[in-house]
Image: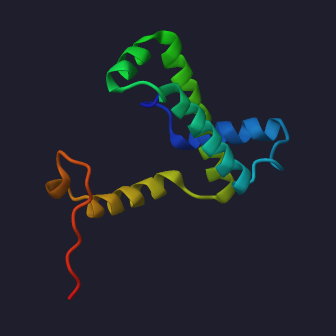
Amino acid sequence: MNDKTTALCELKEMMADFVRQRDWEKYHQPKNLAMSIAVETAELRCLFQWHDHGEVKTFLANSRNRKLVAHEMADVLAFLLSLSNVTGIDLAASFEEKMAHNAKKYPAEKVKGHYKRPARAAKA
């Protein structure tokens, strides 16, 4: 499996099978999954916590560290996929909709090269 050849629906089904095989449906409820996503993102953040930008590049060049980061990212994704399964939310459609919203909120011609949100036009 890799990002270029694996469909999101395959990952969602893999996660659903994993949960089903363990009879974990009773635990994989929206609140629990949202909390688990927060826990896993905290574990991911801990890997980078005390490194400045230059140190992160060196940190990620180490194969063991890179594997740790990859596994934490996969944990976040696993719980997100399960949350999508449980809620029936289509992640691809939601992502497309949110990116369209973000494109309007952060027009490239107004934010290119910086992160600040452009000022809103005054209401008449």
Q: Residue 38: x, y in percent?
A: 61, 45
Judge left or right: residue 19 versus residue 10.
right
Judging from the image, the colouring scheme is rainbow
Vertical arrangement, residue 44 with respect to residue 32, above or below: above
Give x and y (percent) for residue 5: 46, 30
Image spot of residue 64 (x, y percent): 53, 11
Residue positioned 40% across, 13% down in the render: 61
Residue at the extreme bottom: 124
Q: Quadrant of the C terminus?
A: bottom left
Residue at the spot 27% in from the left edge and 64% down from the top edge: 104
Q: Residue furthest front?
A: 50
The answer, for residue 28, to whether it is visible in the render is yes
At 67% across and 43% down in the image, what residue appears? 36
Q: Residue furthest left?
A: 109
- Residue 1 seen in the figure: no
> Residue at left 74%, top 35%?
18
**Quadrant in which residue 54 is drawn:** top left
Q: Is residue 35 above or below residue 102?
A: above
- Relative to 73, is 95 on the left or the right? left
Q: Is residue 67 above or below residue 13?
A: above
For the residue pair 117 and 24, the one nearer the viewer reads as: 117
Q: Is residue 78 left or right of residue 73?
A: right
The total of numbered circles placed on residues is: 0
